[in-house]
Each structure stands twice: as structure tokens, then as C-alpha cells.
Image (cartoon, grey):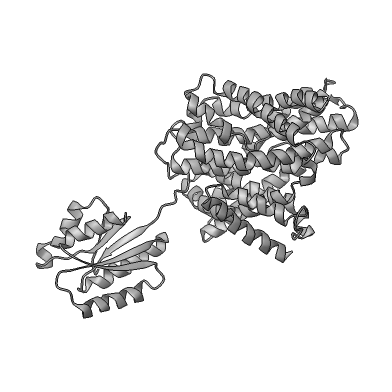
Amino acid sequence: MLASVLWILMMGFFVGQLARRLGAPPLIGMIIVGILLGPQVLNVISPDVLNAADDLRTLAVMIILMKAGLGLDREKLSQQGTVALRLGFLPAATEAIAIAFAAMVIFNFDFLTGLLLGCVIGAESPAVIVPGMLRLKSLGWGVTKGIPDAILTGSALSDVLLLLVFSLLLSFLGDGGVEQIVLPGGLTLTPLQLLPLQIIMQIVLGLLLGYLAARLLVVLLVKQNWTQNAVQDTVIAASIALFLVIAAHWLPYFSGYLAAMSMGFFLIELDAPLARRLRGGFDSLWIVAEIFLFVLLGATIQLQVLEKIFLPGLAILAIGLLVGRMLGWYLSTLGSNWNWREKLFLLPGNSPKATVQAAIGAIPLAQGIAGGETILAIAALSILVTAPLGAWATMTFAPKLLERGEVDPTKVTVATRTLLVAAVDTSGLATAVLTKVADLARRSNGEAIILHVMNLPNQQEIEQLKQQSQQLLADIRYEFLTVNGAVPEEIIRIAQEHKATAILIGKRGHQAWENVLIGSVSQAVLEASSIPVILVNNS
């Protein structure tokens, strides 16, 4: 089992990074690794790990949904009005119905079996969509109109609808009929008549439990101070989110995934600093969870069942996507402020399938439903086609179809490179400047340039500065530079050439301290630099 974990982590990471370097999403490499390591090819993954694949996928999806919730923007969602809500129901419903009619023609299914296939294929994959939309938010694509937020919310809601209809159809097709339900007062309803109430109940209870969980987290982590660092905060938050997901399996009256996502969303509203700390923690968890999710996804794909239905399966996917789902997208964005390019972006951004198909694709076959093997094969085909294609197309076409807006660092983690330029001379302030730049670099996990501008080179003094830098910045990645020229101009030039985050320089003058606040060089750099300047003194 440990060897399997090692294979999954190492192969998944490096092949994923190889795919990234070739211009493809890392998940493509991870899925390929899963296929190669799985029972279809090399069969090196332990059966114990494969048996736990569903649980591990559930854990990974919980992590990515928490990331999604912690990145949602309430103001952007409110600006969209009903677009996000319509995206949660219309595209999934129209795709499922289009697939049902297509399956009646192509596979001679009856309508209910075709609709069962439509529910399996129509579900959207949070594991593919959420990372893509959060990446777009961190880059600013579509954020002005809240397009990534609308897609994130819609994808979470759509799975509630399709999973409920899927369960209803399984019951009907498996038992040959559905028993009526007698409510208090003698009112008799069929499960189909109860479906709208079930959908509303799943959403409302999911939002309510997410809100209560968020308040509990604030009490435990902020008001009661049960934790001492961000790692412990993340462990507690992940445990509560996982409990919500597991509880939804025991008590199927609410959506556990929606509860986990809404918990992250409400945390932003209740305590934004806590949400920021948790965002960083879940970013770290996702690095490992992503590898397990997509490698195990590839390992569970049944390649042998694809042979007979490859071309008909592609036709089903094309009809569902290009006819059914596009009709749903048109109805969802009708009357909105989205232009035609932004509406067209829904084609790559809102179409990937993966986790839901892997979770429920084999259930009809296991329950002996006619056409179950075909349903499983098309579910596997939808993963192989739409997951990598959708992930690639999202990042490829976003710059062509969406407008770039200002990134909101309070909603997403913005990865920035910190590079500090420390300008030092041979005075006693050099130690203070080097100590300060080392401290700031450690806090930001940044790098440094130690710059000494020489007018009359003194090799002995330069060697002393190098030794001092090596001693004080031993655990910092830095470069020691010496240049000739006018001191203020050279400091600013080097900082601009290297795109520095900030300049650190000693705060001193040539006159008595009482007569001058800062030195002439410091004053010149401070006035001329467009890059922030930090002045350091000995006190």
C-alpha cells in the first residue's frame, strides 16, 4: 500500500508537471499516470488503495469545494442576479434531456433509461471546474462581471438536481416502479411530485448547515482560540467540512458538497482574516489531494468497455453538449450583461466531467439495469474526453473570450514573487539592512539582491560584506551584486531591471542626527523610485 502511495505521488506529480511544461493542464498527465498504473495496464496500485478510491475522491472534492467557497465573491454574485441560479439548473437539465432523446435513437433506450444516462453525463465536475475558475480569478479574467463566481455556484447547484433525479430513476428502473408516499393528512404524492421539494430542501439545508458550521469555526478558532497556528486552523476546518459531506450520506436530506462550499463562503462574511488563513491552508492540501484525485480517477476508468461504443459515445457527448447544454447556457444568460464572447466561454468553462461520473457511472450496471454497461462506458468516455479538453480549453480561451479585470486579493490567493533589493555600503548600517532584508524574505518566502555601489573599489571591504551577507542570509536565496556609478541611480536601475518588490536602504545622513532626518542617498532614492522604499536604521 505504501509503495502504491509512493507511485501515485511521485509519478502523478512529475508527469503532471511534464504536461504543464508542454502546455497542457497537469491533470492530463495525472489521469494518464492513473491509467498506466491501474489494473488495466501495469496493475501496480494496491487493491486496498483502489478500494479506498471513492473515499479519497470524496476527501479531495471536499477540499476543492472549500477552496471554491473561500474564493466566492458575494458582490459579484449579487450583480449577476439569477444567472448563477439558472446556470445551476438549466444547462444540466437540457443536456440530460437531449442525451435521453439521443440515446433512444442511437442505443434504442427507453426514455427513462436515456434520462438516467443523461443524469450521469450531465453532472459537472467540481474537481476540474473549481481549480480552473479559481485560476481565472487569480489572473483577473472575467472577474469584473463575476463570471467565474457564477460558474462556480452553478456547477455546485447542478449536481444537486441531477443526483436527486438519478436516485429517483434508479429506484424506478430497479424496482419496476416507485411507491407512492403518504404524507400526514392523507395526501399522497409520488417521488416525482416530491422532487421539487427535495431539491429546495437539499439546497436550503445545505446552506443552513454551511452557515452554522462557519459560525462554529469562528467561535472555536477566533473567539475561543483553540488553535495556535494556520495549520491547526486548516485541520479543524477540513474536519468539519468532511463531517458535513459524510453526514449527507447518512442523512440524505441536504447536499454535503453544497454545505462544504457554503461554509467557506460564509467564513468570508463572518471573519475575513480567518478565511484568508484557511485559503492558504487549503491551497496546500489541494497540492496532494489533486494528485490522488486524478491518478485514482484514471485508474478506475474501464478501458475495455470503450471499444464498442466509442463513436456512438462521442455522438452522445456532442449532442448533449452542443445541443442540450448550449440551449441551457442561452436560457441561463438571457437578459444578462454578458456579451457573446463571454457566453461562448461557457463551452470550455462549464462542460468538464470527471468526479461525479467516476462515482456513479457503475451504479446502474451494479444494480442490473438494462443498458448499465453502456452507461458505464459513456461515463468513462466523458471523463477521458471532457476533463482534459475542458481544463486545457478554459485556460487557452479565457484570454481570448473574457475581459481582464482587477484581481481581488481578499478572495483568492495571488501568487507573487517577492524580490527585495538591499542597498548596502561599508558603514555600520549594513548589518541592520541585511538583518531586515533576511527577516522580510523569510516572512514572504522571497529572494534578495544584495547591492553594493562602488565609487572607489575596496576589495577587502567587499569581501567583508560578502561574508556578512553569507552569515545573515544563509537560508535565503540571494545574489550579491557590485556596480559602479552614481549611487541613487544605480540602486533604482538594478531594482527596476530585476522587477524588485521593494528596496531596502540605510536611513542616515552626513550631518548630526538632530539636523537631518535621512541621508542624501536615501532621500534621492525615496524621491525618484517608483518601487516602494524601506528605510532602515540601527534603533
x, y percent for residue 39: 78, 54
Q: Residue at x 78, y 59 (%)?
A: 48
Indicate the quadrant containing the N terminus: top left, top right, bottom left or bottom right. Answer: bottom right
349 to 506, vertically: above or below: above
x, y percent for residue 494: 26, 59
Residue 69 figure quarter: top right
Does residue 441 appear to the left or right of 23 in the view shown? left
Asked whether the viewer can see residue 142, the reply is no
310 to 47, vertically: above or below: above
Does residue 113 appear to the left or right of 281 in the view shown? right
x, y percent for residue 524: 15, 57
378 to 96, vertically: above or below: below
Does residue 21 appear to the left or right of 464 in the view shown? right
x, y percent for residue 97: 72, 24
Residue 92 figure quarter: top right
44 to 125, vertically: above or below: below
